[in-house]
Image (cartoon, coloured by chain):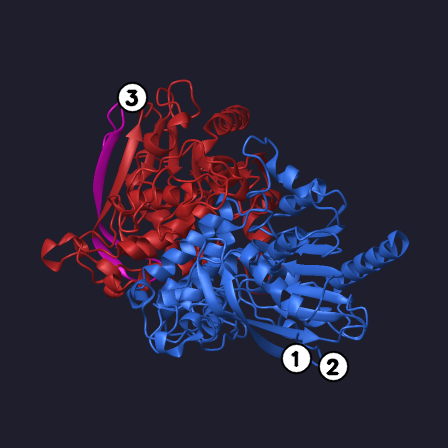
Chain colours: A blue, B red
C-alpha cells in the first residue's frame, strides 16, 4: 500500500503494476503508471477527486488547469486528495511507445509495437493504483476532452465506487467526424519518411509530420471567431523561414487590413501572424511530444464507445441505454463553439443520464474553452461538488 | 473578336492573352485562359451570366453544378449565355504551374515559379476574354466558395458592367481561420520530400503530402453532423492497406456500434468506414490535381480582401466601407453548418451592401452544401434573377 503524504504541494510518483492484460488481450508486465497528487487523504479515505487529462497533457494539473486548483478553487487540495494519473500511450510517464518493453531496458522501447490501449484500460489500471492506496471511494472523477471520455468510463465502476463525475467537452463515443480528424493527423505523421513505420531514431523524429498533425489538431480545438478576433489579417513582423518553426510570433506594428498588396505576400515565407502562430505552437509541441505516442493516443480515442459490450446489438437507442445504466450524478459541460465535439453531444449525454445535468459555456474559444474558461468552470464545478456532497449527506 | 456559336451544348475553349501584368507586377506573356460556355449570346449581347468556379473545380459547370444548369433551371442556356472561366493557377487549362513559361515549351512549365495570381487578377484577365467577345454587360456573376469571392471582386467593375452578383458560402476577405487551414495544407504538401520545393517529376508527384492536404480540406468542407449521419462508427468491410488510397470504400454488413472491441481495431489498417471514405476521396482528387497548383490557389485565397486599396487605412469599418461602394443588387448565401466560412460572414456581407439580400440554406452538409443543395439554390437563384430583371426593366 502506498501511503499518501499530507502535502499541499504536488507530488509526482510512478508505480509499477506487475501484470496487466489490456482489452485487446495483450498482457504487459511491470507497467509504469505515472501520477501526481495534490492534498492528502482524510481519515476515512473518501475525499478523493480523480482528474483525467486530455490528449496532449500530463498529470501536472497545475500546468494545464491552473485556475481550477487551489485553496479557494473547486479543486481544493486542503479539502480533497486530488490525483491525476497518466494514460497508457501518453509520453508523460506511464507505459507508452517511449518506455522499455516490460520495463526491460535490454528490449528497448515499444515504439510502434506498443499495443492498443483503450480508455477502459486506463480506467482499470488507474483503479489498481487507487486500490494500492486503499482508496475505495471517489467523490468525483473530472476530465475534459479525452479526460471527459475517461470520466464517463470511470462512472461505470458504479455509484458506490465513483460517487459523481464531470465530463467536459467530450463524446460518449467517438463518431466519424473525430475519427476522420484523427485519420488526417495519423496520415500526416505516417507519410513523413522520417517516421519509418514508427522505427525512427529519437534524435531524428518525424518532426514535419508531427507538425502537420498538430497544426491541424490545434485548429480543430479552436474556432473561426477566436482566430478572427485574435489575428484577423494581421501580418507577421518578419518572414519566418519554413525551416525554423520555433521562432516567436510577433505582430508587425501598423499593418492594416486595407493596405495595398504587401510585398511579403509574394515571398515563400508566411506573411500572416496566424501562420507564424500555429507554426510556433505546433513546433513547441513537437519538442515535447512523441510521434508514436500521438498515433497511439488517436487510436485510443477511436476505440472510445461507452456502449461497447454494455448494450445488446439489437438496441435502437444504444447511447441512451448505456447512459441509463449510470446511477450517480453526472455533470456534462459543453463549449458552445466546439466544432470537434459540438455541445449537442454533451447535451445528449446529459439527457441520457438518470441524474444528469447539462451546462454550456458560451464562448468563441472552441474545444479548448475547457482549458481557458477556468473561472466559469470553477464556479460550475464548485456548485456541482457542493450539491453532490449535500445529497450524499442526506442519502448517507 | 471571338464569335460565340449558338449552342445548347457546352463548348470548351482556350484563348491566349498576349500580355498580362499581375497585381504583383509580374508580366506573363501568351497567357492561356480556358473557359466553357453554355447557350448563346442574344442580339444585344446582354444575356451573359458568368459562373466562377471553386478551388478544386474546372470550367465544366455541368460537372459540379449539374442541378443548376438546364432548360428549366436558374442557369438556363436557352435564355442566357453562360460562361465559366478558369482561374489562374488552377490545373484546368488557364496559365498555371503546369503550363509552359510564356507558352514556350522549351522553357518548361512554371512549376513552383508560377507567380502569385490574385482573385483580382482572375477578374481582370477574364474580363479581357469577355471584351474579345464584345460583351459589355453581365447580367449576373455567380459563384460559390472561391467563386463567391471572385463574384464579389467582379462586382467592383461597376453596376453598368456587372448588373448583379451572387456570392455563396464565401468570404469578403480571408481571415486568420481560413488562412491557417491553408497553411496546414501547404505544410502537408511542402513537407513531403517528394515535393522537392515544387521541383518534382510529374510522374512522381508528392502524393502523400497532397493526400494529407486534401483529407484536411475535405473535412473543413463538411460538418460533424454530416459525417455522423453518414458513417457513425460503421466499420469498413475489409482493411484497406495504407498504400492503396484509391480502393473503393464499402461498408461491412451487420457491424454494430455496440459490438465488442473488434479485432480489426488492433490492425494497422483503418477499420472505420469514414477512414476509407476520406482516403478514397482524397486519392481520387490526387489523381487529377497538381501540388504546385494546390499551393498556388491557397496563396490566391489568402490574398483575397475586398478592402485592399479601396478603403483608407484609418477606416474603422473597412468591410462596410468597401461593400458600401457596390451599387448593384447582390445576393449573398450562407450554409448554416459551414465551419470554414460560417454564415455570419455572408450575413455581414449582405448587411454591408446597399442592395444586399441574405439567404441561408439550413443544412448539415457544411461548406460543400453549395454544391449539394442545388434544388434550393436553384429556387433562390431563379427568384433573384427574376427580381433583378424586373428591376432592370423598371429602372431601364
State the extent of the magenta-drawn residues as a range.
Answer: B1-29
- Compared across the picture, whether A101 is left or right of A131 comes to left
Crowding near pointer 1: few (<14 within 10 Å), some, many (20+)? Answer: some
| Whether label 1 touches label 2, CB < 8 Å | yes
Above/below status of A18 relative to B80 = below
Q: Position of residue B232 (x, y in %)?
A: 50, 39
Residue corresponding to mark 1? A11
Give the CA distance from mark 1 to mark 2: 8 Å
Q: Which mark is residue A7?
A: 2
**Viewer-closest of B169 and A284:** A284
Q: Badge 3, how many Cα within 10 Å: few under 14, some, many 20+?
A: some
Give the letter of the chain under mark 3.
B
| Disc 2: host chain | A
Find numbered disc 1 in the image and state the secondary structure of the residue it sits on.
Answer: strand
Mark 2: give few (<14), some (14-19) or many (20+) Cα within 10 Å. Answer: some
User: Residue sitting at 67 percent across and 74 percent down?
Assistant: A37
Q: Are marks 3 and 2 on the same chain?
A: no
Amino acid at each position: 500500500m502506498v501511503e499518501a503524504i499530507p502535502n499541499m504541494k504536488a507530488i509526482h510518483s510512478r508505480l509499477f503494476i506487475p501484470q496487466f492484460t489490456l482489452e485487446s488481450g495483450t498482457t504487459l508486465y511491470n507497467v509504469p503508471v505515472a501520477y501526481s497528487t495534490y492534498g492528502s487523504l482524510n481519515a476515512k479515505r473518501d475525499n478523493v477527486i480523480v482528474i483525467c487529462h486530455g490528449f496532449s497533457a500530463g498529470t501536472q494539473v497545475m500546468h494545464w488547469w491552473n485556475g481550477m486548483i487551489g485553496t479557494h478553487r473547486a479543486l481544493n487540495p486542503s479539502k480533497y486528495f486530488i490525483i491525476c494519473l497518466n494514460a497508457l500511450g501518453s509520453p508523460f510517464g506511464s507505459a507508452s511507445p517511449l518506455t522499455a518493453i516490460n520495463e526491460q531496458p535490454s528490449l528497448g522501447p515499444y515504439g510502434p509495437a506498443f499495443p492498443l490501449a483503450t480508455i477502459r484500460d486506463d480506467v482499470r489500471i488507474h483503479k489498481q493504483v487507487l486500490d494500492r492506496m486503499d482508496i475505495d471511494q471517489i467523490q468525483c472523477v473530472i476530465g475534459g476532452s479525452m479526460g471527459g471520455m475517461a470520466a464517463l468510463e470511470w462512472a461505470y465502476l458504479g455509484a458506490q465506487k465513483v460517487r459523481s463525475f464531470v465530463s467536459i467537452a467530450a463524446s460518449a463515443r467517438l463518431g466519424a467526424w473525430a475519427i476522420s480528424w484523427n485519420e488526417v493527423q495519423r496520415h500526416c505523421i505516417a507519410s513523413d519518411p522520417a517516421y519509418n513505420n514508427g522505427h525512427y531514431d529519437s534524435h531524428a523524429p518525424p518532426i514535419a509530420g508531427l507538425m502537420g498533425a498538430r497544426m491541424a489538431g490545434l485548429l480543430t480545438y479552436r474556432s473561426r471567431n477566436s482566430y478572427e478576433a485574435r489575428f484577423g489579417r494581421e501580418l507577421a513582423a518578419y518572414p519566418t523561414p519554413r525551416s525554423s518553426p520555433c521562432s516567436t510570433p510577433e505582430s508587425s506594428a501598423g499593418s492594416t487590413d486595407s493596405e495595398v498588396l504587401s510585398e511579403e505576400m509574394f515571398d515563400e515565407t508566411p506573411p500572416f501572424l496566424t501562420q507564424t502562430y500555429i507554426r510556433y505552437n505546433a513546433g513547441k509541441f513537437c519538442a515535447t511530444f512523441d510521434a508514436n505516442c500521438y498515433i497511439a493516443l488517436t487510436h485510443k480515442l477511436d476505440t472510445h464507445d461507452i456502449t461497447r459490450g454494455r448494450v445488446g446489438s439489437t438496441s435502437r437507442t444504444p447511447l441512451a441505454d448505456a447512459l441509463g445504466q449510470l446511477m450517480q450524478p453526472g455533470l456534462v459541460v459543453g463549449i458552445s463553439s466546439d466544432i470537434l465535439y459540438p455541445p449537442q453531444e454533451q447535451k445528449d449525454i446529459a439527457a441520457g443520464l438518470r441524474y444528469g445535468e447539462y451546462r454550456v459555456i458560451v464562448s468563441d474559444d472552441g474545444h479548448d474553452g475547457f482549458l481557458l474558461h477556468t473561472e466559469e468552470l470553477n464556479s460550475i464545478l464548485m456548485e456541482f461538488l457542493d450539491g453532490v456532497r449535500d445529497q450524499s449527506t442526506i442519502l448517507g
